């Protein structure tokens, strides 16, 4: 098991380039099964979750070739619609394969992804959406089989704007007969990227970025050469790390338009942020200010995936901040670890009351999930003394060598393998 060893207290400074978005790449990789010609995807990050998805695609029979951050996939040779339970359990995002496999093969077999560290994460909205398109769904234990000789467009209203359910329904509807309308759709930038990809292979999708998405079914699908958007959560993580260490960092290949709510909150905390085409500059000198009420909610509100990282910055602020988590019920696992580093945070139902302290102190902490892990790395970089972050594999799911990113900005951080 790898660990990160961090000697904290050095202001980060310098320039880094942001890699492609995991949460855009995963559904788009699944969607390549709809293409009738090979597809080239650029800016595919080297992350554990992406490699698991590529393994699943290979298992389904796809021809996959990776050269650096360019992945070429020929999904036309896929010959299976069964996602093996072993691979399904490795990554929840394999649920994205349901829509495209069902559309392509008329049936799909997957397994319940089960609970996960940040909450229950049901897939009922995915299944209801597929059923509305005409799929017959059988659940036996954890096995789920969906069948439909031909899917038919329908009007589907989501009770909650689930990112994954919106994406699954969009992909299933691409080849359906007639028009599908998703009402109450999620509006995340990754959904807009999926729409761009689907249209690039010939699909007829519009409305992504609003709460109503329309898909007109077509069989006329080809291939494409496509560039994935930059990762807004990696960008946000680096921005918060720059501020928490009172450094000055420039992020290139970033998209500030995807981070409006974070930028707004960080400016309220007194962080200096400048944006121009593809570039974000972050600088912080003194102690941050407390921010009274932050609520995580679906895009464009404050992202749940930045809640843990922002909490580190606010734990160093002058004053009391309140962060309410409304998307996932189990997303305060980093709080105990931050308190062990000297933070003063109290949980009251789904709110964290963060009383700023002048400094954090390094100690051994454990990454319990991806973003909690990223938060502990930021805390370690800002803290006095040595921090050891265990269970780094959680962080590797979403950050390509996080230690290299921060070391290139002058952070004293390295990875140690226990063998
Ligand atoms: C995606 C992101 C994840 C992010 C989350 C919320 C990917 C690969 N992952 O996850 O990083 O934290 O959006 O921004 O894109 N829900 C149901 N029934 C369903 C589906 C969801 O009740 O069928 C609930 C979930 O339990 C959760 C909430 O809806 O409480 C949000 O989930 P959702 O938007 O679906 O997140 P994911 O797509 O899993």
Image (tube, rainbow, N blue to C red):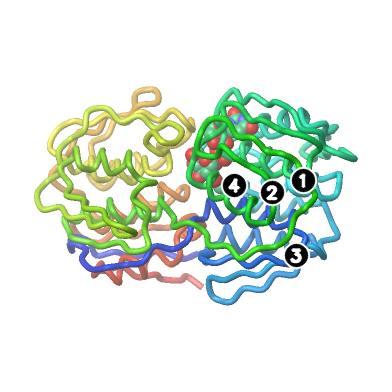
As measured in the structure, the alpha-carbon distance from the residue carrying label 1 to the one carrying label 3 is 15 Å
Q: Are marks 1 and 3 in contact (CB under 8 Å)?
A: no
Give the mark nearest the N terminus, 2 or 4.
4
- Residue toward you, 99 or 177: 177
Residue closest to the far right: 149
Give the mark nearest the N terminus, 2 or 3.
3
Cβ(mark 3) to ligand 1 < 8 Å? Answer: no
The quadrant of the picture showing ligand 1 is: top right
Residue at numbered disc 2? 203
Residue at numbered disc 4? 195
Give the mark nearest the N terminus, 4 or 1.
4
Q: Are marks 2 and 4 in contact (CB under 8 Å)?
A: no
Residue at numbered disc 1? 218
Which numbered dot is residue 37? 3
- The residue sitting at 20% across, 42% down in the picture is 267
As measured in the structure, the alpha-carbon distance from the residue carrying label 2 to the one carrying label 1 is 6 Å
Residue closest to the far left: 286
Task: Bin the neighbour count of mark 1 within 10 Å (Cα to Cα): few under 14, some 14-19, many 20 and up.
Answer: some
Give the mark nearest the N terminus, 2 or 1.
2
Is residue 120 in sight in this rendering? no
């Amino acid at each position: 098991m790898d660990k990160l060893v961090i000697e904290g207290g050095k202001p980060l400074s310098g320039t880094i380039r942001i890699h492609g978005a995991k949460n855009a790449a995963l559904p788009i990789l699944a969607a390549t099964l709809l293409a009738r010609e090979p597809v080239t995807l650029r800016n595919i990050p080297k992350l554990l979750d992406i490699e698991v998805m590529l393994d699943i695609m290979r298992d389904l029979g796809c021809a996959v070739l990776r050269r650096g951050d360019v992945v070429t996939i020929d999904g036309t040779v896929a010959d299976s619609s069964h996602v093996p339970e072993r691979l399904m359990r490795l990554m929840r995002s394999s649920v994205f394969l349901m829509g495209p496999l069902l559309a392509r093969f008329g049936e799909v077999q997957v397994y319940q992804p089960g609970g996960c560290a940040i909450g229950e994460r049901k897939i009922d909205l995915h299944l209801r959406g597929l059923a509305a398109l005409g799929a017959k769904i059988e659940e036996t234990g954890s096995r789920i089989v969906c069948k439909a000789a031909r899917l038919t467009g329908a009007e589907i209203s989501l009770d909650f704007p689930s990112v994954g359910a919106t994406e699954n329904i969009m992909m299933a509807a691409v080849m359906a007969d007639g028009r599908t309308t998703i009402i109450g759709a999620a509006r995340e930038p990754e959904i807009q990227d999926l729409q761009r990809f689907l249209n690039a292979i010939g699909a007829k999708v519009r409305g992504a970025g609003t709460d109503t998405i329309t898909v007109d079914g077509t069989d006329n699908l080809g291939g494409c050469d496509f560039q994935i958007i930059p990762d807004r959560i990696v960008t946000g993580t680096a921005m918060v790390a720059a501020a928490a260490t009172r450094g000055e960092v420039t992020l290139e290949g970033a998209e500030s338009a995807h981070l409006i709510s974070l930028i707004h909150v960080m400016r309220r905390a007194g962080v200096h942020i400048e944006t121009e085409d593809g570039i974000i500059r972050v600088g912080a000198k003194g102690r941050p200010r407390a921010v009274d009420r932050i609520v995580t909610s679906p895009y464009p509100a404050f992202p749940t995936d930045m809640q843990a990282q922002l909490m580190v910055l606010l734990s160093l602020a002058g004053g009391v901040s309140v962060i309410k988590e409304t998307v996932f019920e189990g997303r305060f696992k980093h709080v105990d670890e931050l308190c062990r580093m000297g933070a003063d945070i109290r949980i009251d139902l789904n709110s964290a009351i963060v009383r700023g302290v002048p400094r954090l102190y390094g100690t051994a902490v454990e990454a319990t999930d991806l973003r909690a892990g990223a938060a502990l790395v930021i805390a370690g970089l800002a803290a006095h003394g040595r921090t050891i972050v265990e269970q780094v594999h959680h962080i590797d799911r979403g950050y390509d060598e996080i230690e290299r990113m921060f070391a290139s900005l002058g952070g004293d951080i390295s990875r140690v393998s226990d063998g």
